[in-house]
Amino acid sequence: MSAPILSVADLRVWFGHPPDRVDAVRGVDLGVQRGESFGLVGESGSGKSTVLRAIAGLAPDWSGRVAVAGETLSGARRSPAFHRRVQMVFQDPYASLHPRHTVDRVLAETLTLQGMDDIDRRIVRLLDDVGLGRGFRFRYPHQLSGGQRQRVAIARALAGEPELLLLDEPTSALDVSVQAEILNLLTDLRADRGLTYLMVSHDLAVIGHLCQRLAVMQAGEIVDRLEVADLRAGRAQNAYTRHLIAASQYQRA
Amino acid sequence: MSALLSVRDLRVTFPSRQGVFEAVRGVSFDLGRERLGVVGESGSGKSMTGRAILGLVRPPGRVTAQALTLGGQDILNLPERERRKIRGRRIAMVMQDPKFSLNPVMRVGDQIVEAYRLHSGAGRAAARLKALEMLEAVRIRDPERVYQSYPHEVSGGMGQRIMIAMMLAAGPEILIADEPTSALDVSVRAEVLRIMDDLVRDRGMGLIFISHDLNLVAQFCDRVLIMYAGRIVETLAARDLHAARHPYTQGLLNSLPRLDAPVERLPVLERAEEWREGPLVDASMTEALPGGLR
């Protein structure tokens, strides 16, 4: 097997200081192969989003070893090469776009920061790639629907032509019909650009749709790892995983 | 036996710069002692329907209807004073997120007591006992402790149970639950639903369950109304939801990823203009109450 694009060993993340210290992630090991789509599932508070945030440099207090494409990370600072290679898409498209910046400005700023040339042409292409078209270029976020905003957020993440996308519940704030469109977009982009995804979701069906492998988190630890094929076939062994699968189907008593 | 709540041609309009915007465009249904699901996407008017029934649409929004009756009594044209007597006492509402519905600087128990005394006029001591009894009814293990706690000290699932306890203390005939479990984790969600289910059954209440989650509604409710662009486009028994006939309902169901039926690409909903005005699929909704009126 080739070297993984992302490897995480004994990742621990905490917030605050004793006696109020909260250990959000307690020793997580992960390896994501280039080109695959890996899912992290768990309930709120399980630490799944915190894993992504620590990788992205958004959680200052962490320990362990995290390497992306051979580059070992430390602290909360990330190199320009990291920002080019790894981008994140957040859960809430209403909160992750600047309300007073147009789509054009959001993308132009990102492209400039990534040191890209030919910005005008790239903006048009990015908008085409995420299925928005140039008519959306000079709109403000409040003139866009939730799905359109998430497309802008994805376009922004793609601006630096990354290799790895960290997806934090990218569709959970959207209607099911819009969720289907965004999931299809993510499928197409991964095929076209050879992207690698690390995706967090509480929705097993969404993870099952987009990913090949997944890990189940509970209370800051990975309690189960399985292939999506096993998940589909009902071959999950772990008690907590089975509990999650059962709970996602409400049964009347 | 007549319906608990009867709604005919309900409309909610808001003035806008482009003219009058109709958020709800002629919704009619009857509610018996049943669990009625209202499903639709954001902007379909499902929450606005619930708010209009309670009289919670703020000006400049306007609510009109041919009829809006509770137990045969007109409630649309009541003065605000009279309306307040119904709200909470006879029709209660549980909102999506307990974080925003509970007063953050007041003990949970005192909030339930306040609501209960307002509706029942009971004394302090009796209201306190009632609050503890309600907390127990929503299966809170240590009601004394929760009674003394502040909202930030309880979890989301606990907060939602407290909201349900508060709403049910006054013994309403109808509970409107607007996405009551969307902010909750799946395992907590199942328990909150079960509590609501038992309470509705034991007390013979009517429940309007507003949700965007088709599978949840199919499993939890007796009957489902599907809303699109402010209108009901289809109504059917919840157990038949997967045999829905309206292309919109079918489209919504198909766009859900499924563990048991993997696909490369999900079917995307192609919206048709005629859905906005087309006829209702299954017009039996206002006469028959399948699963209701037990």
Image: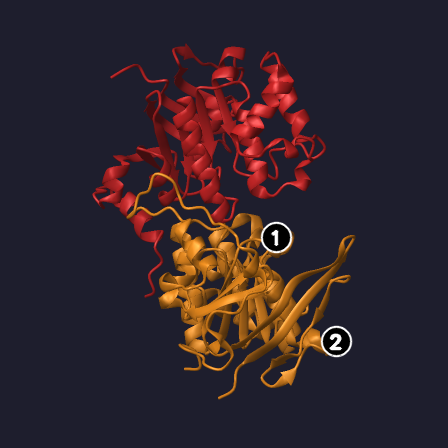
Q: Is residue A110 above or below residue B244?
A: above
- Tag shown at residue B81: 2
Q: Amino acid at mark 2?
A: Arg
Tag 1 secondary structure? helix
- CA distance for labels 1 and 2: 25 Å
Q: Which residue in the structure is indicated by mark 1?
A: B100
Q: Position of residue A166 (x, y in %)?
A: 46, 28
> What residue is rendered at 50% in x and 45% in y?
A178
Q: Is residue B34 left or right of residue A231?
A: right
**In the rendered picture, chain B carries what hue?**
orange
State the quadrant of the C terminus of chain B: bottom left
Subunit that carries the residue with mark 2: B
Residue B122 shows up from this direction = no
Q: Amino acid at mark 1?
A: Phe
Q: Position of residue B195 (x, y in %)?
A: 42, 65
> What residue is rendered at 32% in x and 34% in y?
A214
| Residues flagged by tags 1 and 2 on a common chain | yes
